[in-house]
Image (cartoon, grey):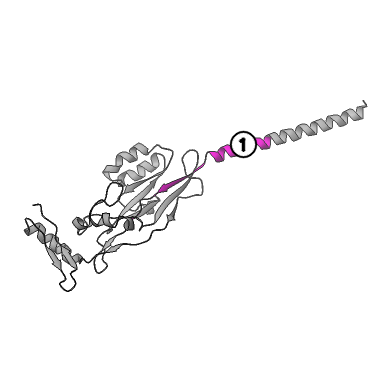
Amino acid sequence: MSLRRLYGLCAVLVLLAGVVLCRTYWVGQQTAYAASAGGQSVQTLALPRARGDFYDRTGRRLTGLSPQYYALCLPGDAGYTALFPYVPYAEQSLLYERRNLASPFLIQVDRDLTAQGITTCTVPQHFGGSTAAHLLGYLDSEGRGVSGLEKAYDDLLAASGDARIVTCFMTAQGRLLTDTSPLVAVETPGTGQGVRLTLDADLQRACEGLATLYLPRGCIVVMDTATGEVLALGQYAVV
């Protein structure tokens, strides 16, 4: 073999070796990128769904009169410290237990913390000293009607509010990805329906107050004699 051919063969081998090294480097980079991307995640959290309200004969709300606030807690002590002063006592243990998890979560707070840079969502509080509570009935721990009008119209009221979700783009370390923020979106639109009753809110409150003060047993009923509609029904006393 001539010296020239030997040099040519060496050059080809060097070129092939360079191609292999470049390919190996590229594959390594792609693998590292895939591993990094694989550590990222999209976390989706469901907000409590607002329940449809009851209204009196003039359209005044009997339920849903006050708001409830749900704040997004991100993993780490910073989120725990920022939220602790605003979390109801009953929820403080939950906040403490979940503070070091790698996933964000929603927790009830006593005010809107948006101005403090904390993602906060508002959901109407269905009850809260509601007028005619004894007629409307009660909900179970899952927010379903189990007595009274709440039970009778449960399907309609449960579908009223929008089903909303909070989406967070997280790193493998449980932090929000740079240049991203939590997104609040409607997953399933609600019907917006409620139930209007024949009750008059002012008369109802007056009758409940009188029944509490002066009625040892029985009830007070106010009706429209022309239509037979019940305008007020004072709370039953214990017999």
Question: Is 164 rendered above or below residue 226?
Answer: above
Coordinates of residue 130 in the picture (x, y in percent): 22, 57
Coordinates of residue 98 in the picture (x, y in percent): 37, 38
The residue segment tinted magenta is 25-52
Side of 34 where 228 appears, left or right? left
The residue closer to the viewer here, 134 or 5, is 134
The image quadrant that residue 162 belongs to is bottom left
Q: As drawn, which residue projects farthest toward the right? A: 2
The image quadrant that residue 96 belongs to is top left
Residue drawn 35% across and 42% down?
81
Residue drawn 30% across and 41% down?
92
- Which amino acid lies under the numbered mark 1 shown in the image of this protein? Thr
Asked if residue 163 lies in the magenta stretch, the reply is no
Residue drawn 36% across and 45% down?
82
Coordinates of residue 42 in the picture (x, y in percent): 49, 45
- Which residue is disc 1 drawn over? 31
The image quadrant that residue 2 belongs to is top right
Residue drawn 31% across and 47% down?
142
Residue 51 visible in the picture = no
Residue 105 visible in the picture = yes
